[in-house]
Amino acid sequence: MRISRSLEVWKMGTVNYLEALKLQDKLVSDRKTRKISDTLLSLQHPPTYTLGKRRTDHNLLVPETDLRKIGAELHYTQRGGDITFHGPHQAILYPIISLRDIGLGARNYVEKLELTMIELASLYGVKARAGQTGETGVWVGERKIGAIGVRISSGITSHGLALNIDPDLSYFKHIVPCGIADKEVTSLGKETEVALPAEEVIHEQLISCFARVFGFSDIIWKDDASILFDNQSIE
Amino acid sequence: MALRMWASSTANALRLSCVSRPPLSPAFSLSRCFSSVLDGLKYASSHEWVKHEGSVATIGITHHAQDHLGEVVFVEVPESGGSVKKGGSFGAVESVKATSDVNSPISGEIVEVNTKLSESPGLINSSPYEEGWMIKVKPSNPSELESLMGPKEYTKFCEEEDAAH
């Protein structure tokens, strides 16, 4: 019997990294106590470099002060994965979902996140694939188009995926992306022969791919994200 | 009976990894597959195990957990001397770009941590119940052990979790 499962999707535009982290912490806590059901945040960040739990800052190739000079922030996080860059024209999804409710382990969850990006790429005629062992993420040939870094706390997910739509790839030159040297970074814009529509359209398609891969039958769209931040300040 | 045969052939088809791999015949395969659940241990629904010996309880994550995580590349354990609370997180395990918090099934004082895990995080995959142990705790409330699952209950719990989807 297929139970109908709904996903609440917040389309948030550009959000500062720390704000998004604080918000995710609150949502994870609410999801644990079942105050909310499965939720997805769809957003972009201003130029931001982030490190995972292993704090692999040897993969940052320039001093932190240089990053500030180019207008980027650096943050250490609790997610899995190595160093990466987030910025304008990169689509980010942060699913706050209960893996136990859908019987997924970490590995399967990451595989489905990869599949979500692979499906989106195929909409634009781009043949992407999941990485080989040790190279998690989504690749077109030997070029990385999408990255994943996830945190799972009592079965509730946070952080998620980042798909390069058309970011300024020169930002990646300051790091060894995901700790994988000698591999290029690419984007949908670089790989497709088709003209890209407005990014809002691509974001919605990415969300639909996610919903389909994860078996959500209903999407509840929420556009007014200010309510999420208002609830935060009341605490 | 039909459900067991379906479950075992599904397990075969999906090549669910088991600690031992004897040639599987339908009648026996289900219990063989879950020889990855050990007797003498207690289990939490978040897939951690506890081995209570005298005044010390050893804690780690189960075979089922490490199988669902994939290859473990990094383990975070706390310092000895700290304390844990039942259901509270005491460390984390990183696999395939996912960091998963590990929760303590019982409350108590941490008396020892497995320092081998920082150099050899893969011990959690290869030996989840022995060399992959994570912390040793002096239980502050031994009655908490009663509310944990025994091997048969935990086996059934895993079956139901995996089958439901």
Image (cartoon, rainbow, N blue to C red):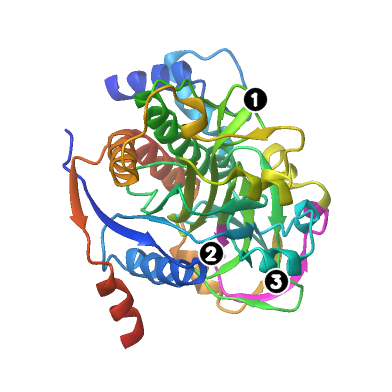
- Label 1's element? loop
| Residue contact at pointers 3 and 1, CB within 8 angstroms | no
Q: CA distance from mark 3 to mark 1?
A: 54 Å
Q: Which residues are magenta?
A: B101-118
Identify the residue at image location x=60%, y=41%.
B96
Identify the residue at image location x=67%, y=50%.
A82
Residue A183 occupies which quadrant of the picture?
Answer: top right
Q: Quadrant of the N terminus of chain B?
A: top left
Residue B55 — which label?
3
Q: How far across and how far down the image is residue A8, in percent?
A: 24, 55
Callout 3 amino acid: Ser
Above or below, comparing residue B95 to residue B36 in the picture: below
Above or below, comparing residue A167 to residue B51 in the picture: above
Residue depth check, mark 3 versus mark 1: number of the one nearer the observer:
1
- Label 2's element? loop
Residue B113 visible? The answer is yes
Disc 1 target residue: A142
**Label 1 crowd (10 A; few <14 / some 14-19 / many >=20):** some
- Label 3's element? loop
Callout 1 amino acid: Glu
Q: CA distance from mark 2 to mark 3?
A: 16 Å
